Image (tube, rainbow, N blue to C red):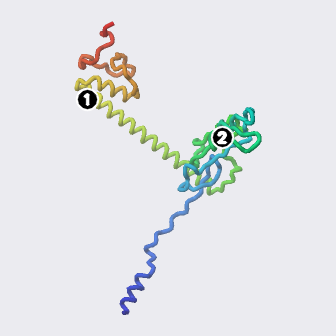
Amino acid sequence: MSSNKKVKKQEGSTDTHNFSKPTKRERYVHCVRCHSSFRVSANTKKSCIIEHDYDAFEGSRNGSWYQGELLCCGTSYRFHRHNSDSKVGQKYCFRGEHTTNPADVDYNLAYSPRHSTMKVCNDSCGSSDDTKAATKEESERQQNDKKRKQQEELNERQNARQRMQEREEELKSQGNTREARSLRAERLGMHDCTDLNSDEDSDDCAEFDYASDSSLVPPWELDD
């Protein structure tokens, strides 16, 4: 009986070694587009919203409607002169993710700075020193990640082109000139190239041997 009680006590006891250590509290950073503070982990494609400036309307009256555009971003806008009916081209000047990188923001979206809803950060943003420091760190991290991804994509494209060029040389050595020329056109980004008989070699590649493929006829030997 006593042994059962002892087991129950052990099962119900608290083992402090099983608790994970508290993680570092995530700091808020500053969005340089809408100028609100946010946590990176909670940032979504609907987090950052810039509303239209409906006072920045320019247009003309057409019957009972006024039709024109909003100078804050150029979207179309029409509204009824006697009631609240209205229709706008796009719901917001911007809706997407928050950003800490000014290069991601189109501050020249409006026709003039006077109508712009995208404001450059200044001292009036009121961010704390901690938020400013966290924002700078996050901005640098995002820019480094962007550069890294761009470099990875560049390396992948270069490797793909190298593989295609090696395959092209293999096809040429096998006498399969037509497929080799088609592959070269794809490698150069000329996916719609149809004139495979052309003797032009704009990329300064070696000339193909027309005699190795009877389906290829030089332009100068075509019948008139």
Q: Residue furthest bottom?
A: 1
Residue depicted at 42% across the width and 85% down the height: 9
Residue 209 horizontal/vertical position (percent): 27, 18
Q: Secondary structure at mark 1?
A: helix
Q: Residue furthest right?
A: 82
Describe residue 62's horizontal placement relative to residue 91 as left or right.
right
Disc 1 target residue? 170
Q: Quadrant of residue 86?
A: top right
Describe residue 121's horizontal placement relative to residue 20 as left or right.
right
Whether the residues at callouts 2 and 1 have beta carbons within 8 Å, the answer is no
- Seen from the viewer's position, the closer of residues 76 and 51 is 76
Number of the front mark, 2 or 1? 2
Residue 164 horizontal/vertical position (percent): 32, 32
Disc 2 target residue? 88
Q: Is residue 133 visible?
A: no
Q: Is residue 158 above or below residue 180?
A: below
Q: Is residue 128 visible?
A: yes
